[in-house]
Image: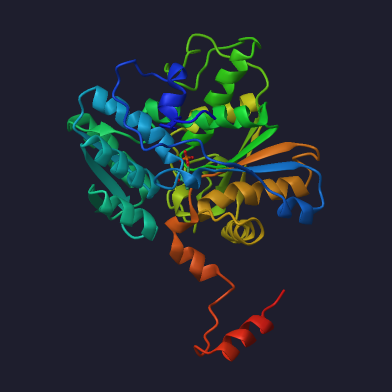
Amino acid sequence: MAFGHRYTGLIDRYRDRLPVHDDTRIISLGEGNTPLIRLNNIPRELGRDFELYVKFEGLNPTGSFKDRGMTMAVTKAVEEGSKAIICASTGNTSAAAAAYAARAGITAFVVIPDGKIAMGKLAQAMMHGSVVIQIEGNFDDGMRLVKEVANSAPVTLVNSVNPFRLQGQKTAAFEIVEELGRAPDFHCLPVGNAGNITAHWIGYSELAAQTGEHVTEACTFCRGHCRFAGGGVTGQRPRMVGYQASGSAPFLRGAMVDDPETVATAIRIGHPQSWDVAWKVREESGGWFDECTDEEILAAQKLLAEKEGVFCEPASATSVAGALRDIRNGKIPEGSSVVCTLTGHGLKDPDTAIAQSSRTPIKVRAELDAVTRAIHDNMG
Ligand SMILES: *Cc1c(COP(=O)(O)O)cnc(C)c1O
C-alpha cells in the first residue's frame, strides 16, 4: 500500500456502485473492510476438508454490520435535508443510528423493547445522545410503530426497509469476493428481518453480472436502487443459507411468529421485514433456511471464542452453529468454501457471555506461592 493512503469507509471505496453523487456529504466512521478470518482449529477437530471463513462484522465502528447500512442511510437522510432519524431495534441498529446521527449532527430516536436488550447496545444508544424510547413490547411492536410515526412526523426511517441500508450492506459481499478471488460456495448468515441475507445476495449478484455472465430476469431485490434494476443476473454466486433461532424462526414455520423468544436477542424477530425477498434469495441461490436451538447457538459462540479467539455475540454464532451441523451431515459437501457472517461483537452482550462461561476466576491470596500453585494446577 502506498504511504498516505487512509481508509475512509465503504462509500468512498465503492462509490461507483452506490447511490451517491460526487458532491454528496458522506457520513462515515470508517466502517467496512472487516477481516475475513480462516478458521483452523475447528475444522481440524471436525476432521473434514473444507475452507471455513468468518467475516467478522463485529469489528465495525459500533460493533456490528449495521454500520454498513447506516453510513448509507444517514448519508442519504442528510442529503435529503432530514434533521432526525428513527428506528426500531433489538439493539445494534439503535447503536449504529445513534453513532451516525451524532456524526452527522442530527437527532436519532430509537425505539427498543423493554428489557431484552443487551447491555452494551443500550450503553451505546445512551452514550451517543440518542433519544431512547423503551416500549412495553417487542421488536415487532416497535417496527409497526416507527413505520407509522415516519409517515406523519418529519423523521427518516432507517430500519432495513430503508433501501439505502441494503445498498450499504451489500458491500460485505464485494469485500469477500475481492479477498477470495471468487464467491464462496456457501454463505451462511443469522436471519432476523432477513435484510442482511438479501443485501449480500444483491452484492454477489452485481458482481456476477459484472464478470460477464448473463442476465436472465429482473433484479427483484434492490427495490430499484442497484444498477441492474431493469434486468437481473446469474453467474457464480454462493448458495445463501439462513439460520434462525428455534424460538424465533418464522422462515421455518412458514408463518409469522407472534411471541419470538431466544437468547440471541439480535434475531428475536417474529415478523421479518424482508419476508418475500428472502424467500426469493433462497430459491434463486439454491440455498435453504434452518434453525438452531439456543443451546447450539451458545455452544458455537463459546467454541469460536475458545478455539479460534473470535468473540462474537450470540446471534452471530447462529451462522457457525448451523454451518457446522450442515458440514457434519453432508448438506455442505467436503471441499466446499464456506463464509459465515459474524454479525456483531461479543462485548455487546457481556451478561450472556459471563452467564454461560465454564471458567470462573480463581481467587487466591496475593502471594507468589498461591499464584504459582494456581498456574501449576491449571496447566494444559
Ligand atoms: C441485525 C442483526 C442480525 C439480523 O440481521 P437481519 O438483517 O435482520 O436478518 C443478526 N445479528 C446481529 C448481531 C444483528 O445485529
Q: Residue furthest front?
A: 3
Location of residue 180 in the rendering, given as x and y in whole percent from the top left corner: 66, 31
Which corner quadrant holds the C terminus? bottom right
- In screen coordinates, is 116 left or right of 371? left
Q: Is the residue 373 above or below the residue 200 in the image? A: below
Foreground residue, 141 or 304? 304
Q: Which residue corresponds to the image point at 49% horizontal and 47% vertical from the top-left?
A: 58
The colour mode here is rainbow
Look at the image and tell me in which quarter the N terminus lies: top right
Image quadrant assignment for residue 185: top right
Report which quarter residue 215 is drawn in.
top right
Residue 198 appears in the figure: no
Q: Position of residue 35 (x, y in %)?
A: 56, 41
- Could you tell me if residue 209 is visible in this image? yes
Residue at image position (62%, 28%) is 177
Q: Quick one: 88 or 354, which is closer to the camera?
A: 354
Residue plotted at (45% across, 16% down)? 16
- Looking at the image, is 332 positioned above or below residue 74? below
Counting labels gives 0
Left of 150 or right of it: where is 183?
right
User: What percent of the width, then of the height, locates residue 140?
Assistant: 37, 45
Residue 229's spot in the image, x, y percent? 47, 13
Name which quarter of the figure residue 350 lies in: bottom left
- Left or right of residue 148: residue 180: right
